Image (cartoon, rainbow, N blue to C red):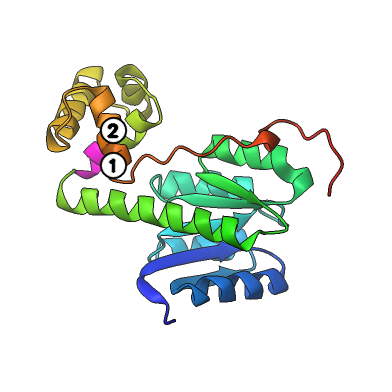
Amino acid sequence: MEPDTARQVFFVDDEPQVLAVVGKTLELQGIGVTCFESARACLSQLDERRCDLLITDVKMPEMDGIELVIDVKRRLPQLPILVVTGYGDVPMAVRALRAGAADFVEKPLDREAFLGAVERLLHQNAARMSLLNHSLTRMEARVLDLVLEGRNSREIATLLHRSARTIEVHRSHVMRKLGAANVVELLRRAADMGLLGPREAKPDEQEPTGEPA
C-alpha cells in the first residue's frame, strides 16, 4: 500500500531498530511517516513540514519525550501527540499526558493496539482540521478544544489572554456553527464528528506496583 500523503506522522525514538520497525508498520498501513533519532531533529522539521500526528518515545538522551511534548504544545497546541513508554516509565507517561499528550501506549508495542491509537488520533485530527478549514476560525477552534477539555469560560480567558466576555462570544459562535443549544449538545456534536475521543482509563495510570512482565 502506498503511503497516504494526506496523513503524515512524525516518529521520534533514539533506537534505530525501533524506528525501522515502527516506520515500516505505519507505511504498510498507507501512512506517511518521517523518523527522527532525536527530539531536536524533530523540532527542526515541525515548522517546515506537515505533521498530523507526533509519536515519541519518553526516555531519550539530551531532550526527553516530556520536554518534547511541552515544546511542541507551545508551537502547535492542536497537534496530537502519542507517547510510547516502557512499563517502568508509566508515571513519566502520565506526566506527558498532563503536559498535553493525547494518549500513550506501552512497550513492547502491541501492533493492533498501537495502530488503533494511531488511526483514532489521525481521525480526530482530520475532523478537527476539516472543521477549522471549513467552519471555525482558529480562535474558535482553540476555544472548542479547551471546552472539550472541561474548561470554563474564565479558565479559557486566562489561558488565551482574552476577556471572559470575548470567550463567551467565541463559544456562542462555536455552538451556533455546530448546531448546539447547550454544552451537552456541543459535546454530543463533537463526539459525532470524531472531535471528542475520551481516552480509555488505563489501570497503569497510577504508580505501578507489580513486577514487569
Residue at disc 2, secondary structure: helix
Which image quadrant: the N terminus?
bottom left
Query: Which quadrant of the figure has residue 46?
Result: bottom left
> What residue is at 59 percent from the left and 50 percent from the top?
83
Assess whether residue 174 is covered by the magenta stretch: no
Q: Residues within 10 Å of mark 1 (few under 14, many from 20)?
A: few
Residue 4 located left or right of residue 177: right
Query: Which quadrant of the figure has residue 192?
Result: top left
Residue at disc 1, secondary structure: helix
Residue 51 on image: x %, y %? 41, 62
Q: Amino acid at mark 2?
A: Arg
Residue 136 located left or right of residue 90: left
- Looking at the magenta stretch, what is its main secondary structure? helix
Residue 192 shows which numbered tag? 1
**Extent of the magenta region:** 137-141
* Cα gap from disc 2 to disc 1, whole angstroms: 6 Å
Closer to the camera in the image, 165 or 110 = 110
Q: Amino acid at mark 1?
A: Asp
Assess whether residue 140 is covered by the magenta stretch: yes
